[in-house]
Amino acid sequence: MTELEKMLSGKIYDCADPEIAALQRKLNLLNEEWNATPSSSPRKQEIFKELAPNIHPSCFIRSPVYFDYGCNIYMGENSYANYNLTALDVCPIYIGKGVHIGSGVSLITPLHPLDAEDRAIYRNEKGVLTDQEYGASITIGDHCWIASNATILPGVTIGKNSIIGAGSVVTHDIPEGVIAVGNPARILRKITEQDKLKYHPELFAE
């Protein structure tokens, strides 16, 4: 098993492995180039195809973004992410179709050992400074809304149609069709028929 395979499968891996380090260097450059390229430039779309090849072309992503590897982010049709999306894709991040992601959202898959000795920097067999890391995948179901500045932590699954409130920190799975808020995020209530716009005429101009 290569270090990259270990990383993607959620096993302890050496983050200084040459293959992994090369991927990160490439992504750092692509992040910088895409973030600095004007939206009006045809080059913007070309860069993004290389930056995040598994994000569906119908998605709309505002710059800047900050990805670790890019290729481990899978996003379905017609999803959207506002400014300052951070998606640290040490393990795969699965985002469904029709998902709305607010500004400043963080999707975090990396993990570090809890024991300080296990977490310490050390020299690997090649004499390169590194540490022990691992991760856990994130899954966001179809038609979710992840509001601004929410943080989704490693291993979390969010059920379809659910809403995560602004600034929430999601530490555990959230079922489908609910509103969850807070730190740690807790279920506030179910989304019901009464939440449909037709029951809220006050929201429409006369």
Image (cartoon, rainbow, N blue to C red):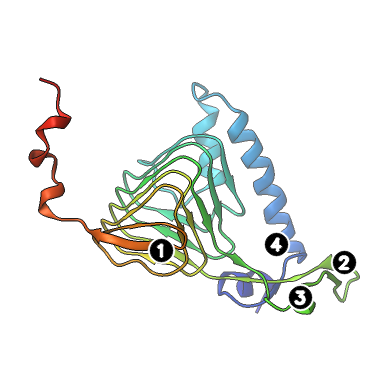
Q: Image quarter for residue 16?
A: bottom right
Residue 128 numbered tag: 2
Q: Nearer the viewer, mark 3 or mark 4?
A: 3
Query: Spatial distance from mark 2 to mark 1, Cα to Cα?
Result: 33 Å
The 10 Å Cα crowd at callout 3, few under 14, some 14 to 19, many 20 or more, is few
Q: Is residue 159 left or right of residue 130?
A: left
Dot 3 amino acid type = Ala
Q: Mark 3 or mark 1: which comes first in sequence?
A: 3
Q: Nearer the viewer, mark 4 or mark 2?
A: 2
Query: Spatial distance from mark 3 to mark 4, Cα to Cα?
Result: 24 Å
* Dot 2 and dot 3 residues touching (CB under 8 Å): no
The 10 Å Cα crowd at callout 1, few under 14, some 14 to 19, many 20 or more, is many
Q: Give residue 155's position: percent from left, percent from top.
A: 48, 70
Q: Mark 4 or mark 1: which comes first in sequence?
A: 4
* Dot 4 and dot 2 residues touching (CB under 8 Å): no
Q: Residue furthest right?
A: 127
Residue 139 numbered tag: 1
| Quadrant showing the N terminus | bottom right
Q: Which residue is mark 3?
A: 116
Secondary structure under the numbered disc 2 in the rendered image? loop
Query: Spatial distance from mark 2 to mark 3, Cα to Cα?
Result: 20 Å
Dot 1 amino acid type = Thr
Dot 2 amino acid type = Val
Q: Is residue 185 left or right of residue 43?
A: left
Q: Mark 2 or mark 3: which comes first in sequence?
A: 3
Q: Nearer the viewer, residue 181 or 138?
A: 181
Dot 4 amino acid type = Ile
Secondary structure under the numbered disc 4 in the rendered image? helix
Query: Spatial distance from mark 4 to mark 1, Cα to Cα?
Result: 23 Å
The 10 Å Cα crowd at callout 4, few under 14, some 14 to 19, many 20 or more, is some
* Dot 4 and dot 1 residues touching (CB under 8 Å): no
